[in-house]
Structure formats: structure tokens, C-alpha cells
Image (cartoon, grey):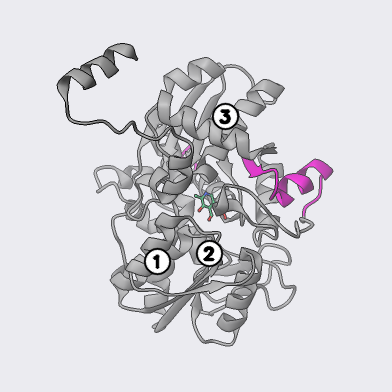
Amino acid sequence: MIRCVSCGAEYDDDEVIYTCEKCGSVLELVSDIDVSKDIFDGRRDTLWKFKECIPVDESKIVSLDEGGTPFCKCDKLGDELGVNLYVKVEGSNPTGSFKDRGMTVGMTKAMELEVSTVGCASTGNTSASLAAYAARAGLRCIVFLPSGKVALGKLAQAMFHGAEVMSINGNFDEALEAMTALALEKHLYLLNSINPYRLEGQKTIGYEILRDLGWQSPDRIILPVGNAGNISAIWKGVSEFYNAGFVKDLPMMTGIQAEGACPVTNAFRKGDRRVVPVENPETIATAIRIGAPVSDIKALNAIYDSNGYSETVSDEEILDAQKLLARTEGIGVEPASAASIAGLKKLVDQGVIDKGETITCVVTGHLLKDPNTAIDACTKPTEVDADIDTLRKLLMNK
Ligand SMILES: Cc1ncc(COP(=O)(O)O)c(C=O)c1O
């Protein structure tokens, strides 16, 4: 069953519906977990090992073996900050971001509904993922991207997997509005995170964190927030397993935004449950360059209900954290993902995070998604002939 998170109106699972017809709010799937957690043991480590908890038709699954991502204990960085740190590396999904979790479920639903065309607006990763899964499913794929603001790797993926890519003169929020209008006119099936089936896939990040910690909850989960779907999904996941009795505690959900695109943090600071959109969002972390997040209600509920927090970080803090994670722990992430590490540092400094807390930072996309930013942050390689004497001298002088 699909239910409105604001007025509680209920809709059938097979209705193609993105927002509540009664009040216009966002929707969620209502799942009842009545299995033992032991049934997940011994299954292949993809997100479909949780298939009983994902409300789609198993016979229609479109998968690239997503999920089951690394859960890295990061003692060097953790010791420096005085916390017990684990990093959930979502860049290890098939197309390099957490979006694949949402897309495998969303595309499976698209097959169930027998649609022929799927579409999304995207800051980049959603389009890369949608294009790959549409190719696997054999469906037509339309993608709207904000012109000039999509990292190179993501653009290459969307184009190469065969999506029909349109570069929209406007920001992500405007591109999404246009794409949604076309979906409501039934030209395509919308696979942005306003579609509640997307979040049914992404909630498995929450499932896996609890499982990865030996069926315990971390004190806190920290992640970047853009359109606010992922924080909502992860909270749904951990809450479902908590309600099923699989764990005894719940984590504090902590959402980090870029200073130039921070409607959720602004709302949190005022204690509001809705955002005031940021008109011209701007940040080097283009994945979270979003001013009007569609899942704001769900995200703010997650933060308040979990006794969580929201904070902003500057572009400089993001780039510093990106380098720190890459060079102390060997984990390469794109700028948006590094917002979680930058946020962790800032909240430790502010005393919001207590020493000794067990923290999971979700890093959402791979370093190679945005090669330009990575290269710009480094000194160019020295050009030198393949002459041993010269090379030896250079090495000795370092
Ligand atoms: C790498 C990365 N991190 C974080 C986000 C933000 O996720 P959400 O829009 O669900 O808040 C995105 C969204 O595109 C992303 O691509």
C-alpha cells in the first residue's frame, strides 16, 4: 500500500502516482516485515537478499547486483577525531553511486507496470544510474540535466548507456519541474526520488549498516543531503528493522548540506517541518546543488524523530575532507560525498558529536564521477624523460 506521509490517504500499489491527490504531499510505501532476520544469512550480498522487505514482483527484477557495499572501519581518521568511525562506500555500486539501489527497485516497478519510457531530471548520478538500468531493461530513457553543472563522469555514463540527454537551461529544480510535468501528462514513468519505489531500494543502506555492525545501530549516521530522498530512505530502513525487533536502538540521522544550497539546514535551525526554497543554489558539490528538495518533509521528520542534526559545510571544507579521506583511508569519493566527512569534523569541533560515538558516514558517489575537480585539486605530474640518472636525482631530492 502507498500512503501519504502528511494526511495518511492510501493508494493501491499499482497506481502510477507521485504525490498525494488529496493534499499534494509526498508518498511512501507501507511495508510490514514479518520474517526472521536469519533468512538473510547465506544469501548473495546484493540488496535483493532483503527481497521479502521490498514490495515489488520478484519475477520482474532488473538488477546489476547492486548493494552489499564495503563497510570500512576508518581508525586513522576516527582516532584523529575521537570517534569510532565506519564509512559505507556507496561509490562501489555498479554505476558508482547509491542511486543504483533506488534504480533497481524503481526499474523493477517500471517492468511490473509495463511502461515503455522512463525519465528523470538529475544533478548527474540519477541519470547515470537510470540510463544503465533502462538499457538493461530495454526501455527508452529520457534525461534532463542542468546545463554545464553536471560532472564529466556522470554525463559520460548517461550518454554512453544510450539515454536521450537534454541539457536544460536552468538549475536542477527547474529541470525536475519540467520532467514531472511530462510524467503527469503520462509521456514517461518518473524515476526521481519523489517516486516512493526509489526509496524502497535506498532504504537498504540502512538495513545493511545495521547488519554490517552485527545487528547493532551506530549512534549516528551522517550523510550529504540534496533532494533529501536518501536520508528519508535510510531512516525508513533502520526504523523498519528496529520495529521488526532486529536491533534495540536507532541512530541519530545527521544531514549535511553545502552552505550555498542548504534549505534543510535552514529549516532545522528554525525548528520548521518544511523548507523555504533557496533560489539560486550554488556549490562545487554539484550532486547536492538543489534548492527545493522534494522530500523535505520526510527528511526533517527523520532528523527530528531520531534526535538528529543538520549542519552546513563550505566548499573549502568539502574539498579538504575529500582529500583527507582519500589520503588517510584510501577511499576516493566525489565532492558531495565528502560533505559527510566535512560535517563529521565540524560537529566534533562544535561538540555536537560526543567523543567515543560510533558513527557511520555514508559516502554516496565515487571519486571518478567528477575527475575535473579531482585533477584541479592536485599538482600536475612532473614531465621527465625515461632517464634513470635524472629520475634517481629527482627521487633523492624529494
Ligand atoms: C553523490 C551524491 N550524494 C548525495 C546526493 C543527495 O542525495 P539526495 O538527493 O537523496 O538527498 C546525491 C544526489 O544526487 C548524489 O548524487
The answer to the question of whether label 1 and label 2 lie on touching residues, with beta carbons closer than 8 A, is yes
Residue 280, horizontal then vertical, whole percent: 72, 58
Q: Residue at x 57, y 76 (%)?
A: 179
Is tag 3's residue or tag 1's residue first in the polypeptide sequence?
1
Element type at marker 1? helix
Residue to which mark 2 is pinned: 122
Q: Residue at x 79, y 57 (%)?
A: 276
Element type at marker 2? loop
Q: CA distance from mark 1 to mark 2?
A: 10 Å
Q: Is mark 2 within 8 Å of ligand 1?
A: yes
Is tag 3's residue or tag 2's residue first in the polypeptide sequence?
2
Residue toward you, 20 or 88: 88
Residue 260 visible: yes
Element type at marker 3? loop
| Highlighted range, magenta | 245-273
Mark nearest the camera among 3 and 1 is: 1
Is tag 1's residue or tag 2's residue first in the polypeptide sequence?
2
Q: Amino acid at mark 3?
A: Asp
Mark nearest the camera among 3 and 2 is: 2
Residue to which mark 1 is pinned: 158
Based on the picture, tell me whether residue 252 belongs to the magenta stretch.
Answer: yes
Q: Is residue 214 above or below residue 371?
A: above
- Label annotation for residue 219: 3
Residue 7, horizontal then vertical, whole percent: 73, 67
Q: Residue at x 68, y 71 (%)?
A: 9
At label 2, counting other C-alpha atoms closer than 10 Å, the crowd grade (few under 14, some 14-19, many 20 or more) is: many
Q: CA distance from mark 3 to mark 2?
A: 32 Å
The part of the image, by quadrant, that contains residue 351 is top right
